[in-house]
Image (cartoon, rainbow, N blue to C red):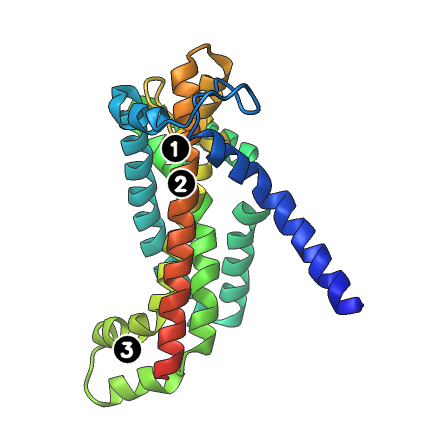
Amino acid sequence: MKKAAHICWLTLILLFIYIPILVLAVFSFTDASMVGGAVSGITFDNYIELFRNEELRGMIFGTVALALVCSAISTVLATLGAIGAYYSKRTAKTLINAANQIPVVNADIVTGFSVCILLIVIMRISKDTFIPLGAGHVVLTAPFVYLSILPKLKQMDNSLYEAALDLGATPVQALFKVVIPQLIPGIASGFMLAVTLSLDDYFITTYTKPSTFDTISTYVVNATRGSQTEVKTALWALSTLVFLIVIAVVIGMNVLAAKRGKKK
């Protein structure tokens, strides 16, 4: 009975999470003008509009480009930071770990407002340069990449690095040929998490983005306030595609992890 109750409770939680997404996905293949509205047939017009509309294409490309670039920068900085903290003395390591926790537990709206004040108000950097926006996304994502890499460092066999030095490798060679290859799973998962956070962010983007630039999150909020039905319903298709891509990536990462486990 206890096992059955646990299964029922887990099923209810999963239904609560995924039913709204599935409903949205179903309506993305209809001609309804609103979710729950009258449906007269199945159509792919929303998906066609998504790729035909130049404004939507530009918004999607800009969002993905921003996420990839900022995530790459975050991954490099977080990898170097995690390695540096791991090999630092106890006091320095504690301070670095504590500093890394602040953006994680801090509200996005506070982070976005702080970046806006520092870079735009105090340093007078124009929002049109994309520097405040990029910096804001790096501040948001880098701490999570750091937290993804740190456990891999703790699992690493430190004697391998020392052995590489004893065999004649320089510290830089030992870093790139011994340490970093062992961190690849953590780096990859951290990068994917950074991409997801960047794609999803709204508050930091709102405070730091150029006035003529929109990401998916800011565009969706503005579109829901407008009256363009074609754009609104095309965003249902976009949400469905993003959801399917995320599922594919998660399944792919789990399959690769299972294969690596069997090889070991």
**Counting other residues with Cα less than 10 Å from the Cα at mark 1, is it few (<14), some (14-19), or many (20 or more)?**
many
* Residue at mark 2 to residue at mark 1: CA–CA distance: 6 Å
Q: Residue at x 57, y 24 (%)?
A: 36
Label 1: which residue?
238
Disc 2 and disc 1 in contact, CB within 8 angstroms:
yes
* Quadrant where the C terminus is found in the figure: bottom left
Residue 126, located in which quarter of the rendered image? top left
Q: Residue at x 56, y 34 (%)?
A: 110
Residue 190 is situated, as x and y percent measured from the top left of the image, at 41, 57
* Residue at mark 1 to residue at mark 3: CA–CA distance: 41 Å
User: Which of the numbered marks, if any, corresponds to residue 178?
Assistant: 3
* Tag 3: amino acid: Val
* Quadrant where the N terminus is found in the figure: bottom right
* Tag 2: amino acid: Val
Residue 165 is situated, as x and y percent measured from the top left of the image, at 26, 84
Label 2: which residue?
242
